[in-house]
Image (cartoon, coloured by chain):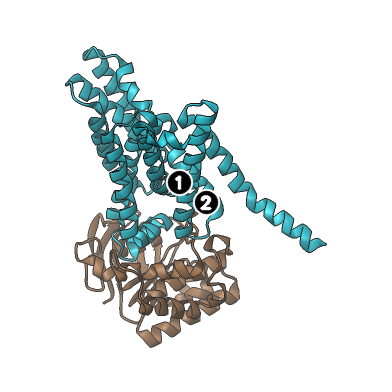
Chain colours: A cyan, B brown
Amino acid sequence: MVELFSLPFFARAAAALLATGIAFPALGTFILHLELIPARFAVMHASLLGAAAALVFGLNPAPAAMAAAVLAGAAIAVISWRGKVSAGGSLGLIMTLAMGLAFIIFYKGKIHAIEAFNLFWGNVLALTPGDLRLTLAGSGAMVAFIALAYKEIQIVLYDRELAWATGVSARAVYGGIMLLVCVGIAVATRITGALMVDAATILPALAARAAARSFRGLLAWGAFFGVVMNAAGFALAFLLDLPVSPAIIVVGAVVVALARTAPHLRARVLSRRTGR
Amino acid sequence: MVVSARGLAAGYGGGADIFSAADLEVGPGCLAGLCGPNGTGKSTFLKLCLGLLRPRQGRITVLGGTPGSRGFKQKLLRIGYVPQNTAGGLLPATVREAVLMGRYGAIGFGRHPARRDRLAADEAMEAAGITGIADSLVRELSGGQTQRVAIARALAMEPELMLLDEPTSNLDREGRIELVRLVKTLGRYRDLTVLLVSHNAETLAECRPIFRFGGGRVEELPLFREGIDG
C-alpha cells in the first residue's frame, strides 16, 4: 500500500484526509454546541443555488457554491444570533427558498439539475492540486482561528449571553464560527460529498464528546478521532474495494459507538473489581 | 446613580410592552430587590442593563453609560451577571474554568489568562464556597452548586455592579441566607451595588430599595412588608 503514496492523486487524498481529520472535528463541535445542524443543511442548499447561478453564466460552480455558502452563513448568523436559538423556522425558509430559486434557474437556464447536483458527490480521490490547496488553507485557517480565539470560542459555546455579558465580542466570534462552518462545509463537500459531510465533522466530534472533560480535550480528542476515522476508513476502502466516504462513515459510526460505550464498560469492570 | 431609568418601556418582537413608563434609580452600595410575578419584566430589566435588549422607549444609564452603545463594552467589564439558567449547556468545563470565564472580557482577544486572573478566580471560588469542587465538571453539579459557580464567575470579574437573576432559586434556606450574607459583605467592603431578582420574602427582606414589577408597571415599594403582602 505504501507505493500508492507515490501516486499524486493518492497522496493528495491522504493529505486532504489528514488535514481535515485534524481540523474539521472542531467544526462538528461548533455545530453540535451551537445547535447548527439545521443551519448546515440550509448552507448546503444555498450553495446549490450558487452553483446553479454559476452554471447559467458559464462560470466555475465550485467557487460560486462556496460564496453562496458564506453568504447564507452570514444571513444565518444574524438570524440565529437574534433568536439565540437554532432559528429553525427561518432556516427552513432559507432552505426551501434556495431550492426553489435553484430549480427556477435550472428550468429557465435549460440546465440539467444533475450537473449542479454533481457538486454534491464529492470524491477524495478526484481532488485537484487546487482543491488540495483550498483544503489545506481552510484547515489551516480553522486551526489558526481556534488558537487565536480559544477562550472566546469556549465562552461563546458555553453560553452566548454570558459571553456578551462578560465583555467578550461574542457576536464577532459567533460570526467567525459561522464563517468557518460554512467554508468547512463547502470544502468537505468536495471531499466527502454533501450527504456525507458529517463524516468529517460531526462523527469525530460526537466521539470526542464521550471522551473529553474539557474544551481543550474536546478539540484534542476530536482531532485524534478524526485522523483515526479518516485513516482507517481510507485503508478499509482500499482493502475491501469500497467507496472512501461511506467507508469513513462506517468506521466513524463504529468509533462513536465504542467511545460512548467505553466509559460504561470501564465503570462496570471497576465496580466488579471493587465488589470482589 | 449606578442604575438610572426614566420612562423606560421594553418588550420582545412584535408583542406588547412588558412594562412601560418605568422610573427606577439605584445608588452606589445598594442591595436592590426586584420582585413581582413571572413574566412581568424583572429579567428583561436586567437584560436592558446589559444591553442585551434595547429599550422601546425611555432612557437607561448604567455606571454612567448607555447599555448597547459603542463604549459600553468597557462598562460590561465592571458588571457581574448571574443569569437565571446557569447550567452552561453541554460543553465540558471544570468549575475552575467556568469561574475563570468571568475574566475573559478583561483579558482581551488573543491573550491568555495571567496569574492575576487565576488569583481572582481562586478568591471568587473561595468566597462562593466552591474551592473544594474546583476540578469537578460543571455539568455534573447540583442546581445549587451550579448557581454558586455562576456567582463565583461574576465575582471573579471584581465588579462594581452585580445583576443576580433569581440566584437563590436552587438554594436551600441555609444557602439563601449565606448568599445574601456574602453579597452584603461584599457590598460593604467593595462598595458593590447589587440588583437581585427574587421571589423569596426572606431574601427580599434584606434589600433596599425594592421594586415591584407587575401590570405593565414598575413601582418602588415604600415598605417591605406592605410590598410582599400586596
Q: Amino acid at mark 1?
A: Leu
Identified by mark 2, the residue type is Arg
Q: Residue furthest top?
A: A110
Q: Which residue is identified by label 2?
A: A209
The chain to which mark 1 is attached is A
The image shows residue A52, relative to residue A33, as above or below, that is above
What x and y, as percent, mark residue B92? 50, 58
Residue projecting furthest to the left: A57
Q: Are marks 1 and 2 in contact (CB under 8 Å)?
A: yes
Callout 1: few (<14), some (14-19), or many (20+) C-alpha neighbours within 10 Å? some
Work out which quarter of the rendered image holds the C terminus of chain A and state it: bottom right
Q: CA distance from mark 1 to mark 2?
A: 10 Å
Q: Of helix, strand and loop, which one carries label 1?
A: helix
Front residue (pair A226, A154): A226
**Which residue does the image show at 46% across and 31% down from the upper left?**
A245
On screen, residue B127 above or below B33: below
Give the image quarter of residue A123: top left
Q: What is the x, y in percent for residue A13?
A: 38, 35
On screen, residue A93 above or below A224 = above
Instruction: Return the residue nearer the eye: A137 or B5.
Output: A137
SS state under label 2? helix
Residue to which mark 1 is pinned: A32
Tell me which label, 1 or 2, sits earlier in the chain: 1
Residue B214 is at least partly visible in this image: no
For mark 2, does the 10 Å Cα neighbourhood hold few (<14), some (14 to 19), or many (20 or more) residues? many
**How many circles with numbers are drawn on the protein?**
2
**Farthest right residue?**
A276
Is A39 on the left-hand or right-hand side of A260? left
Q: Chain of mark 2?
A: A
